[in-house]
Image: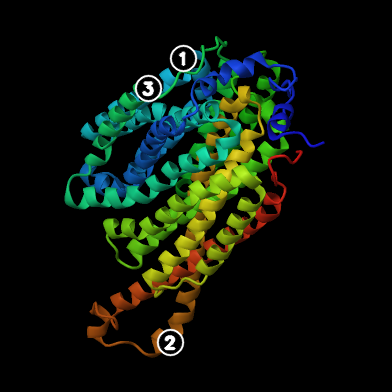
Amino acid sequence: MARSDTDTRMSDVPGSSGTRGGSGTERNPERERIREPDEQTTKWGLPLAVVVVGMFMSVLDTSIVNVAIPTMQKQYNVTADDIEWVSTAYTLCLGVIVPTSAWLGDRIGLRRLYLISLLSFAAFSALCGTATDLPTMVVYRIMQAVPGGVIPVTCLTILYRMVPPEKVGAAMGLYGFGIVVAPGVGPALGGYLVEYVDWRLIFYINVPIGILGAVAAVFILPSFGGARSRRFDALGFACVATGLFALLLAVSEGQIWGWTSYPILILLIGSFNLLVLFVAVELWVPEPLLDVRVFTSRAFVRSLILVIITYMGMFGVLYLWPQFLQNDQDLTPMHTGLALLPQAAVMGVIMPFAGRIYDRIGARWPAVIGLTLITAATAMMVEVTADTPRAQIIAWMMVRAAGMGTCMMPIMTAGISALPSRLSSVGSAYNTLFQRVSSALGVSAMTALSTASAAQVAADRSALSRPGFADTPPAIGAVVGQGPHGIIGLWQQVQGQVLAESYSDVFLVLTVMSALGIPLAFLLRGTRSTQE
C-alpha cells in the first residue's frame, strides 16, 4: 500500500519519525506544536495575503531599483562600474544574511521576525532615498539587504506552518502571484517615477507598503507556538557566509575583472573550499545552522536543480530583453516596463491554477508542461533580429511566462513538501539561497556570453565588410551623415544586428538548458500518493 504524501516526506530525511498523529499512528508532539495554528483556524487566505505583501515588497525593490541605475549614475557623477555596487552590495549582503533566517525564526519567533523585518526594510528604504552620494547609498543598501534577505525565508516558512498540507499547492500558487507580479510591475512603475517624478520615490514607495503590511500582520497573522532556543552555529555561519560572499562577488564582477583573472579564480576556489568545509561543520555540530541532511531527500535535490534551471533562464531573459528594447529599438525605460507587463499578467493568472493542479495531481505534469513551453518559447527567441516587431517579442515572452507560471511553484512546492515540517524553515532557506545565486549567475553568465558573442560577430562582420567598403568609398556627405545611408547610420544598423545575433546565441543556450530539465521533471512526484 502506498504511503500518503505526508508520511513520505516525513521519512525522506534521516532523523524524522515519519509518523503523524491520528488514525492509530504514533503521535509527533513536535509536529503538533508547530502546526498548532492550523487547528485554531481553517481560514488561511487572509493571513497568506499579508505574507504576500512582504514578499511583494522585497521582490519589487530589486526590479524597480535596476531601472534607476543610469539616473543614479548621473546624479552621483560616478562610473558605470562604480554605480553597479548599488546592486552588487545588496546581492552580497543577501547571500550572507539568508543562512541565518531559519535560526532567527526559531529564536525570535516567525511572527515577530516578520514584523521586525518588514518595518526595518521600510525604514532602511527611506534612508536609501535620502542618500546624497554613492558610498552612503551603498551603506544604506547593505542595511536594507539584512531584512531583505530574511523576508523571503520567513514568508515561505510561515506559509508551510500555516497552510494545511493538502492545500499547500493552492497557497504556493497565490504566494507566487506576488513573486511574479512585482518584477513585471517594477520596471514600468520605476520607469514612470524616474522619467516623470523623482527617482528617490523608488525607495520611498516601500515605506507605506511596509507599514501597512506590518499593521495587517499584527491583527491578522497568527502566532506559531513558542520559539525554540537553539545555539547559534558561529563556525558554520562563518563558512557559509564567507563562501557565499566570495561566490556572489565572483559572479557579479567576473565580467568586469575577467573570468580567468587571478582575483576571480581565487574567489571561486576559496568559495568552493569554504562551502565544502561548511558541509563538514554542519555534519559535526550538534545544532547546525542549516541542516545539510535535507539533501538526502531526492525530491528536494531534484527541485533545487530545476530551480537553478528556471531561475537562471528567467532572470537572464528578464535582463536581456529590456537591454534589447532600449538599446536596439530605442524604447524609454517606462515603455520598456510596459512591454514586460503582459508576461507578468500571464504568470499572475496561471500561477494560482497551477497550485491547485499540484494539489490534485502532483508536480510532475505541471513541471513537464511548463518546461516544454519554456523550451519552445526560448527556441522561438533564437530567431530574433534587429527588425523583430515588438508585438512578436511580447508574444514570445508571454508564451515563456505561461511555462514559468505553470512549473515554478509546483517545482518549489514539491521540494519543500518532501521535507518534514520541522525542516521547512531550513528547506526555505536553501531554496532562497539557490534562487539568489541562480538569478545572479543567470544575469552574469548570460551577459558574459552575449558580450563574447557580440565581439566575435562584430569582428566577423568587420572582416567581411572591409574589402567592399574599400572598393566603393562613400561620398563625404554620406560619411559624416547621420541618415540611414551615412556611416553613423550604417554603424547603428550593424550594432543592432550584432546585438540581435549575440542574443540569439544566448537564447540557444537557454533553450538547451530548459530542454535538459524536462527529463528531470518526469522524476518529480506524479501524484500525492506516489511513493518517493
| Residue at disc 3, secondary structure | helix
Q: Nearer the viewer, mark 2 or mark 3?
A: 3
Identify which amino acid the numbered label 2 is placed on.
Gly
- The residue carrying pointer 3 sits among few (fewer than 14), some (14 to 19) or many (20 or more) residues within 10 Å by Cα, namely many
In the rendered image, residue 474, in percent from the top left (x then y), is placed at: 31, 87
Q: Which of the two residues, 465 or 150, is positioned nearer the viewer here?
A: 150
In the rendered image, residue 268, in percent from the top left (x then y), is placed at: 58, 38
| Residue at disc 2, secondary structure | helix
Residue farthest to the bottom, as pictured: 472
Q: Which of the two residues, 316 or 223, is positioned nearer the viewer here?
A: 223
Identify which amino acid the numbered label 1 is placed on.
Ile
Identify which amino acid the numbered label 3 is placed on.
Leu
- The residue carrying pointer 1 sits among few (fewer than 14), some (14 to 19) or many (20 or more) residues within 10 Å by Cα, namely some
| Residue at disc 1, secondary structure | helix
Q: CA distance from mark 2 to mark 3?
A: 67 Å
Q: Which of the two residues, 477 or 491, is positioned nearer the viewer here?
A: 491
Q: Name the residue beneath numbered marker 1.
A: 108
Q: CA distance from mark 3 to mark 1?
A: 11 Å
Q: Which of the two residues, 88 or 397, is positioned nearer the viewer here?
A: 397
Write down the quadrant of residue 134 in the picture: top left
Disc nearer the start of the sequence (3/1) = 1
Q: Residue at x 26, y 84 (%)?
A: 478
Q: Name the residue beneath numbered marker 2.
A: 468
In the rendered image, residue 17, in percent from the top left (x then y), is placed at: 73, 20
